[in-house]
Image: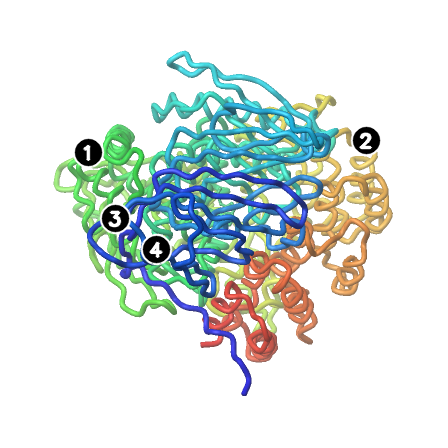
């Protein structure tokens, strides 16, 4: 008889039970060692309520060395798979558990592991159980004291949460530090770091006058790359006081940058651990986008101190309570300190490309999931980005003042507690008096609603009618859908592009309509001509819009919409229209066409001197093939590639003189600067260059080479390389080789190079990727390298990933097989493009499916992968 591995268990939101025991405090003692770290945990435990159940602790991959009850040896326990069950316990006791763990061989990067020479931890969501046996769930809030002992020369810095209260030296070349965190916290916020770092120090005076020490720890030699992160931190702290009235609460805030990290960063109380990608930057190594990303992620983790740490989640189904809200806060921060329209464009682009795709995939789930096998699989664009859109809709419905009153009430009620999404919505409702009953369906319903809008105009009465129907298509997890409460932002324009005030029932009304029913009609009075509607302004709800705009109407909105986001959105719709009509022509083997009014719409954007360069760049830039794919239920890989090339080529050829002329006016002030205008001009330069190289290879090559050679910053360098790569210019290989030689010592910079390799349109791209696995800088053990090369290839090079012989699928599946044992979290994130196979033609779908079936047969399939593969194949 063969032993089959137990089927991974599904956990359901409805099964939540309060904990049987509480743990008021825990003292942890770490004796750090590469392969034999000794962890002693002394917990003060209390029975919660009247019952005689055993205490069931979570634990994974631990060697149990000792169990003591109130200091005495204790044997009334049973070791079960991933659990330690203790019985015959008093109602209150002190439990000592000693475990031995192996950080060096921990390639999953959960729990305690080594990143290069340093020790660090990652406990969210369920990593603490890889350190000691514990009630590893977010509704157990405990006071932590942590003592770390390690070799003094190898690990001069010994860090944990809260305040450093004591330290000392030991005879054998070791030293120790004692930490105490005064705030009770869930185990997922525990952190420990030990290493030899460069330190950047600064301080921040809070509004109430407390001085907070700010410390950023980076690898030796990288201190000059930590200044931007420090500035971002101080900006975030100030902004949270000003906009949300929230002050930092400890005397020290530490950030450590590590090279091996599964995600972006982690908000551990007082001791954030960051992927070095989101800390390290200077002009030589980082692009404008990197700077922007660092500022955002630093802010995000800082904002968690209130939304996540002070008020945390009752259970992991409530993850969006902290993530949706904190993403909303970081988006608002970026918008307030930078360009609101630009940030909105970035957020909406992500929603439409990745989140809509997730909702249409086998992994579809509401922002508050109902069923989970592996929690790591639910750190998704749905929980994060759609979660933020749901908070944003509440903000739209309530207005800033009521929303802030809701936030105050939320903290008044729940500070120091672990709560639910319903608790948050209730606070918003109570503080504002606005009924959020129907609105709260956004938390339980998955899928992307489609709003179908039709209109009519009656000249005699001057009445304009909008008919709005909402429909949410069934998703794999949920067949029945209810109508949602949708804030629908609109504006009406006359034929000269002037906004028209509007009235409903004699009342002039705000821009926001409340769409609540399956079908609804709105009547606007007093319009002297048929208006052009600007619909779903600001992307006021995460929905798809269906309205039969003409090219002329969209061209007018592109030029005249009062908000810049709507101008960009009109351009998106205009291109989408051309894409769809040309795909039709392509299938019928007719000649492709781009109407003159489309070209002139782009020409007038190009020539609009009053338009912010950053926005101009976003409007002119065509979205990539994988984003375009999201406009269709069934994806025609080759057709989209063909038509996108055609549209770009046409625009480039006709507008070449204007692109060239505009390019000459940009960044004339030679020295590199980081401010809105300069960044915007660089971004616009990149767009111009890409069109120029598309229309005229020779001129493109000349400009690219000049830019590359003259570049004193990474943004210009990458711009040149990326155009050379994307347009397959002759200089491409020489420049790529030059860059490789210049940067081989710096893996973070080389990730940009790996990503370009992965994006290459050249037919031999799969072979080059395969040979890059042997590149000295590449390693499957480092998630950043894996994402840069394989992640980018499979998510953003659809033409070759979906090669008709299945070579792209094979490549990805092979990497996933290796990561299944090395790092299941990363493996499960990479698999996303494969599980979407139902949206492709039968030949491709069959090839993708067969790779999934092979994965399903793996002997020790990690439950992260099991969950996604089995959903995809069911
Ligand atoms: N809470 C982190 C954030 O949003 C996310 C995170 C960091 C995470 N590391 C993780 C989630 C590892 C799961 C696993 O900023
Ligand atoms: Zn977060």
Question: What whole-number distance in Å separates the C-alpha atoms at marks 4 and 3?
Answer: 11 Å
| Extreme residue in the bottom direction | 1
Counting residues from the start of the chain, the first of labels 4 and 3 encountered is 3
Q: Earlier in the sequence, mark 3 or mark 1?
A: 3
Q: Position of residue 306 (x, y in %)?
A: 38, 32
Crowd tier of the residue under label 1, counting other residues whose Cα lies within 10 Å: few below 14, some 14–19, many 20 or above: some
Q: Secondary structure at mark 2?
A: helix
Per the image, the residue denoted by label 2 is 710
Circle nearer the N terminus (1, 2): 1
**Earlier-in-chain disc, 2 versus 3:** 3
Q: Which mark is residue 48?
A: 3
| Near-viewer residue (670 or 736) | 736
The reply to whether discs 2 and 3 touch (Cβ–Cβ < 8 Å) is no
Q: Secondary structure at mark 3?
A: loop
Of the pair 9 and 465, the residue shown nearer to us: 9
**Pointer 2 residue Cβ closer than 8 Å to ligand 1:** no
Q: Select label 2 or label 4 by which is in front.
A: 4
| Structural crowding at the residue carrying mark 3, measured as other residues with C-alpha within 10 Å and reported as few (<14), some (14–19) or many (≥20) | some
Q: CA distance from mark 1 to mark 2?
A: 57 Å
Distance from Cα at disc 2 to Cα at disc 4: 66 Å
**Disc 3 to disc 1: CB gap under 8 Å:** no
User: Relative to 355, does residue 120 appear above or below in the rendering?
Assistant: above
Which dot marks residue 431? Answer: 1
Q: Which residue is mark 4?
A: 55
Q: x, y (%) of residue 510?
A: 24, 36
Judged left or right of residue 665, residue 849 is left
* Residue 696 appears in the rendering: yes
Pointer 2: residues within 10 angstroms few (<14), some, or many (20+)?
Answer: few
**1 or 2: mark nearer the eye:** 1
């Amino acid at each position: 008889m063969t032993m089959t591995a137990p089927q991974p268990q599904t956990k359901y939101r409805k099964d939540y039970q309060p904990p049987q025991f509480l743990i008021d405090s825990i003292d942890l003692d770490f004796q750090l060692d590469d392969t034999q770290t000794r962890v002693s945990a002394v917990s003060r435990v209390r029975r919660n309520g009247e019952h005689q159940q055993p205490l069931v602790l979570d634990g994974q991959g631990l060697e149990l060395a000792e169990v003591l009850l109130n200091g005495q040896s204790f044997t009334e326990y049973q070791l079960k798979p991933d659990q330690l069950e203790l019985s015959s316990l008093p109602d209150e006791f002190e439990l000592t558990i000693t475990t031995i763990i192996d950080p060096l061989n921990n390639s999953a990067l959960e729990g305690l592991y080594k990143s290069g020479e340093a020790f660090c931890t990652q406990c969210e969501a369920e990593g603490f159980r890889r350190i000691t046996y514990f009630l590893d769930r977010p509704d157990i809030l405990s006071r932590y004291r942590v003592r770390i002992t390690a070799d003094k020369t190898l690990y001069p810095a010994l860090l944990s949460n809260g305040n450093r209260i004591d330290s000392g030296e030991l005879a054998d070349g070791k030293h120790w530090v004692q930490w105490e965190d005064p705030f009770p916290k869930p185990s997922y916020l525990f952190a420990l770091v030990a290493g030899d770092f460069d330190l950047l120090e600064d301080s921040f005076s809070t509004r109430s006058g407390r001085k907070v020490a700010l410390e950023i720890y980076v690898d030796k030699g990288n201190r000059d790359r930590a200044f931007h992160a420090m500035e971002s931190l101080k900006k975030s702290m100030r902004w949270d006081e000003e906009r949300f009235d929230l002050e930092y609460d400890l005397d020290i805030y530490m950030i450590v940058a590590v090279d091996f990290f599964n995600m972006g960063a982690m908000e551990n109380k007082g001791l954030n651990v960051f992927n070095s990608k989101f800390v390290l930057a200077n002009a030589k190594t980082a692009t404008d986008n990197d700077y922007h990303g660092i500022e955002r992620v630093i802010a995000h983790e800082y904002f968690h101190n209130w939304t996540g740490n002070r008020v945390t989640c009752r259970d992991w189904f409530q993850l969006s309570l902290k993530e949706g809200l904190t993403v909303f806060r970081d988006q608002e921060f970026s918008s307030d300190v930078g360009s609101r329209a630009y940030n909105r464009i970035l957020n909406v682009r992500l929603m439409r490309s990745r989140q809509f795709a997730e909702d249409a995939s086998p992994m579809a789930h509401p922002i508050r999931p109902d069923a989970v096998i592996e929690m790591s699989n639910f750190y998704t664009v749905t929980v994060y980005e759609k979660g933020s859109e749901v908070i944003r809709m509440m903000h739209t419905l309530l207005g800033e003042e009521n929303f802030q009153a809701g936030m105050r009430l939320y903290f008044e009620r729940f500070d120091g507690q672990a709560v639910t999404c319903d608790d948050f919505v209730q606070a918003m409702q109570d503080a504002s008096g606005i009924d959020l009953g129907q609105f709260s369906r956004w938390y339980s319903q998955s899928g992307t609603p489609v709003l179908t809008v039709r209109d009519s105009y009656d000249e005699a009465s001057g009445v304009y009618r909008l008919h709005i129907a909402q429909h949410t298509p069934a998703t794999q997890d949920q067949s029945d859908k209810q109508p949602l409460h949708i804030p629908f932002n609109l504006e009406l324009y006359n034929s000269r592009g002037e906004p028209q005030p509007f009235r409903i029932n004699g009342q002039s009304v705000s821009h926001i309509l409340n769409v609540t029913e399956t079908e609804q009609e709105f009547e606007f009075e007093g319009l002297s001509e048929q208006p052009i509607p600007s619909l779903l302004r600001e992307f006021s709800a995460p929905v798809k819009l269906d309205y039969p705009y003409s090219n002329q109407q969209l061209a007018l909105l592109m030029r005249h919409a009062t908000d810049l986001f709507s101008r960009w959105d009109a351009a998106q719709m205009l291109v989408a229209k051309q894409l769809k009509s040309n795909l039709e022509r392509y299938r019928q083997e007719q000649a492709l066409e781009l109407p003159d009014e489309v070209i002139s719409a782009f020409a007038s954007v190009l020539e609009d001197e009053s338009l912010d360069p950053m926005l101009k760049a976003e409007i002119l830039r065509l979205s990539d093939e994988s984003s375009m794919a999201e406009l269709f239920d069934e994806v025609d890989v080759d057709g989209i590639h063909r038509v996108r090339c055609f549209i770009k080529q046409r625009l480039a050829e006709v507008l070449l003189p204007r692109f060239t002329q505009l390019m000459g006016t940009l960044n004339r002030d030679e020295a590199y600067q980081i401010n809105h205008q300069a960044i915007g001009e660089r971004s616009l330069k990149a767009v111009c260059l890409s069109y120029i190289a598309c229309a005229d290879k020779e001129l493109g090559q000349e400009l690219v080479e000049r830019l590359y050679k003259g570049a004193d910053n990474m943004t210009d360098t990458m711009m040149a390389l990326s155009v050379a790569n994307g347009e397959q210019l002759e200089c491409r290989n020489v420049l790529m080789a030059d860059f490789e030689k210049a940067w081989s010592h710096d893996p973070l910079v080389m990730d940009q190079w790996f990503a370009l390799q992965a994006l290459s349109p050249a037919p031999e791209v799969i072979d080059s990727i395969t040979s890059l696995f042997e590149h000295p800088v590449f390693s499957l053990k480092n998630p950043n390298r894996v994402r840069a090369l394989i992640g980018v290839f499979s998510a953003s090079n659809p033409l070759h990933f979906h090669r008709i012989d299945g070579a792209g699928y094979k490549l990805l599946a092979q990497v996933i097989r290796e990561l299944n044992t090395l790092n299941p979290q990363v493996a499960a994130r990479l698999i996303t493009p494969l599980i979407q196979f139902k949206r492709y033609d039968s030949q491709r779908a069959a090839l993708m499916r067969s790779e999934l079936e092979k994965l399903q047969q793996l002997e020790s399939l990690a439950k992260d992968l099991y969950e996604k593969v089995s959903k995809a194949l069911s």
